[in-house]
Amino acid sequence: MAHGSMSRLPPRPDLAWTPDGAPRSVTCDDVYFSRDGGLEETRAVFLAGCGLPERWAGRARFAIGELGFGAGLNALATWEMWRRTRAPGAVLHYVSIEGFPLERDEAARAHAAFPEIAALSARLLDQWPVRARGAQRLWFVEDGFTLTVIHADAQVALDGMTGAFDAWFLDGFAPARNEAMWSASLMQRIAALSAPDARAATYSVAGAVRRALADAGFAVEKAQGFPRKRERLEA
């Protein structure tokens, strides 16, 4: 499912930190996760938005694709829910694309705001992907959880992937500040990599995002948003 290795180091993110400890992209003028509770936002926007955990109940295998790995918060929240609710012996494949990877110490600083996932955070940080282009796979055997992080441009990474994903977490920075992460060509490629009953979720309700998803074949609906946002998208 993953893209092969590539040369050159990926670019560093231009980071700043909010007073409450959240990482912020100076370039995109956007935070990596909600100041009103990043874990709760992940659970509401992405997990519930993709019908999880109900849709993986009884499944021997489930695959999630993500645009925007960031500090790994969505992956941690998903892992935590998976290990509590998965069928015996089931495996979750989580593949995430990140063009501007955080260093381990930066991720650790971001995770410190969420003590409830401290144990999983420590396990992830022990294997935190190095800053190199291409795919790196982390395998947490006892939990049936594989995490593949691809450091690459999103379009390049998607073009190099195969498989049929059951859910997509679209978590790039806001479209107005990071237009390339929401392009029609990306959504078309996501549709091509999707299982027949795949779902997609995002915090963004921008018109261009709605149209790109709809044009790619997704049935798009607005849903109740998380604090500070009135709405979110499910597809």
Image (spheres, rainbow, N blue to C red):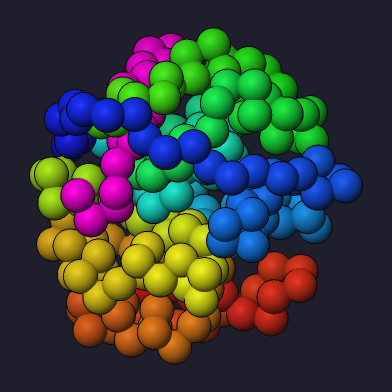
> Image point 81% across, 41% down: which residue?
21
Decide: is 59 above or below 207. Answer: above
Q: Which residues are magenta?
A: 137-156
**Residue 62 drawn in magenta:** no
**Residue 142 drawn in magenta:** yes
Nearer to the camera, 138 or 40: 138
Q: Residue 77's quadrant in the figure?
A: top right
Nearer to the camera, 16 or 227: 16
Q: Where, quadrant-wise, is the N terminus in this rendering?
A: top left
Q: Residue 196's quadrant in the figure?
A: bottom left
Nearer to the camera, 41 or 8: 8
Decide: is 159 above or below 113. Answer: below
Decide: is 59 above or below 198. Answer: above
Q: Position of residue 14 (x, y in %)?
A: 59, 45
> Image point 27% across, 29% down: which residue?
8
Residue 146 in view of the camera:
no
Q: Position of residue 82 (x, y in %)?
A: 49, 35
Decide: is 186 above or below 71. Answer: below
> Image point 38% across, 49% down: which residue?
66
Nearer to the camera, 227 or 132: 132
Q: Where, quadrant-wise, is the C terminus in this rendering?
A: bottom left
